[in-house]
Amino acid sequence: MADQSYFPEGQLISVLTAEPIDRFLDYKAPEGGCFEGAFVEAPLGPRKVLGVVWGPGEGRFDAAKIRRVSRVMDVAPMRGEMRDFLIRAGQYTLTPLSQMLRLATRAPGLMNPPSMRKVYRLGTGDPDRITDARTRVMQVLKDHGGAAFTLKELAEAADTGPTVVKGLVKQGVVQEIDAPRDVAFPRLDPDLGGITLSPEQAEASAALCESVDSGQYNTTLLKGVTGSGKTETYMEAIAACLRKGRQALVLLPEIALTAEFLTRVHARFGARPAEWHSGVTMTDRRRTWRMVGEGGAELVVGARSALFLPFRDLGLIIVDEEHDGSYKQEEGVLYNARDMSVLRASLCSASVILASATPSLETWSNAQSGKYNRVNLTSRFGVAEMPDMRAIDMRMEKLPASRWISPTLAKAVERRLDAGEQSLLFINRRGYAPTTVCRACGEQVGCDFCDARMVEHRFQNRLICHQCGESKPVPEACPSCEVEGKMAPVGPGVERLAEEVTERFPDARIALLSSDLFGSARALKERIESIAAGEADIIVGTQLVAKGHNFPLLTLVGVIDADLGLQGSDLRAAERTFQLMRQVAGRAGRSERRGVALLQTFQPDHPVIRAILSGDEEGFWRAECGERQQAAVPPFGRLAGIILSAEDAQQVFEFAGEMARRDGPLQAIGAQLFGPAPAPIARVRGRHRVRMLIKADKAAPLQRAIGQWTGQFRIPNAIRIAVDIDPVNFF
């Protein structure tokens, strides 16, 4: 607490609450006083709310009316570097500080005092009889590796009633234990030992460990080809961090990757780390938040929001698959976890490792300029070799209507079936068909609340809007002309591709992997494990399969539509296509058998397709950097997206037009304002959307200018405005 000031009882203090009040509130310190950074319970009107002591009070109000803080909460105070991080992140993203605090306190029951509770774990007894409900309870407990559940959580996870759990307790199958609500996680052993690293991996891990041992801020790009063992390499950096008594954080882009990663952590360090993502129970979520602040969690594995946990001494942040678009938060606080990781590390003297086989152009450029260190892994681990990359020119293939697997690709799949090997057919579209059209009048079925076409999901027999989630049954008659029997799906989705595969290869075992088809992370984990064990011949999947999974028997990857991501005017279209194709191709040949990746394309001479096939990654990044630099766009310029929305289209357009006419603060820094214009998806959830885009020099004080510009206007209650600094998507 050396960096914290003490406020004796009754002294005026300034408290930041997580309520939508854009200012600090004055209170009197409670009985016993409090430290700066203390989490407190404070009265606000008739309620008691969560807050943090930010410093001395301002005293601008009648002292007689200032209320006393109710109590100091029994949790570790917020450290100074964490408060600085919230301030700096809020300033960068133009987010009110109260909203940043809300992001940093997303744990249930923080205001509740410590107490005991009954928890349930797997016991040693056997049930007197087996039922489906009992089986589900036991399976949930087995899947979570000894994790404790409350009665409600266990019953809900097993989709049964509490009486089933209580019955298993009586028979000793399930243990009922009185336990503190929050306990430290098992200690990790950095010297337990991992696998024997290759000479290249050992050299790379030594460089990463040296960065961690320095105790100074630094960022390193760990660029390794798919299957090169990046995870095992940076595990040694985690061990170095643990030896120094500091905490480590690993960010993963998908919950689906968590289970396999936790298994590898357990094998390397002898215990499971703390988890933080939407699939974690509320009980463990609260425990993780508290233990991170007290130092009772040495390693946290989680999603992007784990970056806002109150670490006591954070020494290492690893952003795995750092190029992945899921690190960008697109609702609420608009931030990129990759960039915020660098900011947080710089404030607490920590190391950052950005790991990827296909890094983002921003990261690659920073490494080229020397701003970041760079460590390379150029070959696959062990005997595995990189797959051959070939194009299938679809202009030369004879393909019947409503079929998408070319004869060349089909023959390649048949050869793998004969050899007892696995094939992966990849298409980056969920559902059965992206569009449903009436063949009588040409009407395309759209969402009632969005300007987006509804996607048919045949397994659910429903049309679903991928923007707002609205769904409705597939209509028998056209909603426009009311003619029956003329509704037809247009284009392929992953479900339609699976249907074609089933018809084409009737004797093959087919596994369909799409995020829509799994109700829980556990179900997805089970399916992936079964595929890895060889219980499928052909995998049909979406982008989900491109992220980190290892299927030893997989030797063929077929990309159905390699041109899909090249459409449109997105400045990152080439980068994203290159990354996705290289990542999905990297699933092939990750063990002893050599792999092949076949890309079906109508544009085999497109520069991006040629770069993918040639494997000249450095050449691709140099060319892409040259184009971005010439256009003065990121990473050589700055962009900010302004999104306005309202239920009244005329009102939002008129207000956006007024903002565009009064752009003096933007002109003062040499920035350009484009728009207003309807967003590509002009209506979402019943609200009409208007976009503007600001382009500025890299060194321009963009946030300050945007703050001055928007500060000129009194925004009507009916209009919402969002500022997206460094936008990734432009929908």
Image (tube, grey):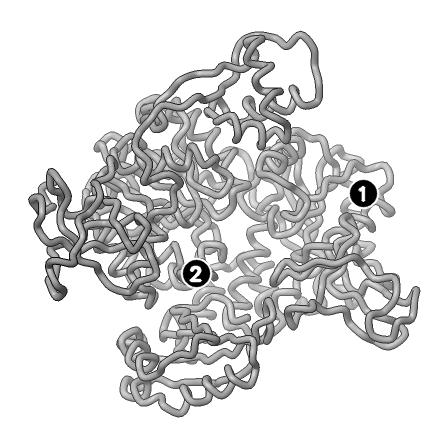
The residue closer to the viewer here, 597 or 176, is 176
Give the amino acid at mark 2.
Gly
**Mark 2, residues whose alpha carbon is within 10 Å: few (<14), some, or many (≥20)?**
few
- Kindly report which numbered mark, 1 or 2, lies closer to the viewer in this rendering: 2
**Mark 1, residues whose alpha carbon is within 10 Å: few (<14), some, or many (≥20)?**
some
Say how many tags the image has: 2
- Give SS at disc 1: helix
User: On the rendered image, what quadrant is the C terminus found in?
Assistant: bottom right
Left or right, 282 with respect to 249, comes to right
Decide: is 536 above or below 401: above
Residue at x-position 24% and y-position 39%? 73
Q: Which mark is residue 332?
A: 2
The Cα–Cα distance between marks 1 and 2, rounded to whole angstroms, is 48 Å
What x and y, as percent, mark residue 82?
24, 50
Q: Is residue 109 visible?
A: yes
Q: Is residue 409 visible?
A: no
What x and y, as percent, mark residue 148?
46, 24
Residues at badges 1 and 2 in contact (C-beta under 8 Å)?
no
Decide: is 415 above or below 666: above
Give the amino acid at mark 1.
Glu
Q: Label 1: which residue?
A: 414
What x and y, as percent, mark residue 416?
75, 39
- Give SS at disc 2: loop
Dot 1 or dot 2, earlier in sequence: 2
Residue at x-position 60% and y-position 44%? 587
